[in-house]
Image (cartoon, grey):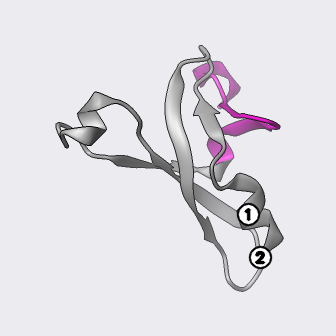
Amino acid sequence: MRIVKDFIGKEVLDSDVNNMGIVDDVEIDKETGAVLSLVIKKKGISNVIRASKSEDIIPFDLVKTVGDKIILKDTYDI
């Protein structure tokens, strides 16, 4: 599915432009084809040594902008 390929590997930034990680997978509603959430793989040393959970699931409702990078909404945008 093309939309999945468009998301995989994109860097995800929070509203303060902090790096959240990279899109590793996309959850899709099979009936409608709508994107439900993004699975974000964390980068950095904590992921390498498995000091923390290595992925987060971000509901697609929290996505503000999709371009070269994906930017999440600020709390006042929600």
**Mark 2 residue element:** loop
The residue pinned by badge 2 equals 1
Question: How far across and down, in percent of the image, does residue 78 sit?
Answer: 65, 32
Q: Which mark is residue 5?
A: 1
Is the N terminus in the top left, top right, bottom left or bottom right quadrant? bottom right
* Residue occupying the far bottom of the picture: 31
* Residue 69 locus on image (x, y percent): 72, 34
Q: In the picture provided, is 29 more to the left or to the right than 33?
A: left
> Amino acid type of disc 2?
Met
State the residue in front, 4 or 78.
Answer: 4
Circles 1 and 2 in contact, beta carbons < 8 Å: yes
| Callout 1 amino acid | Lys
Residue 58, label in figure: none
For the residue pair 75 and 42, the one nearer the viewer reads as 42
Q: Secondary structure at mark 1?
A: helix
| Left or right for 32, reference 14 | right
Residue pictured at 59% horizontal, 57% vertical: 37
**What residue is rendered at 69% in x and 26% in y?**
77
Instruction: Identify the magenta region.
Output: 61-78
Q: CA distance from mark 1 to mark 2?
A: 7 Å
Most distant residue in the top direction: 16
At 66% from the left and 29% from the top, the residue drawn is: 73
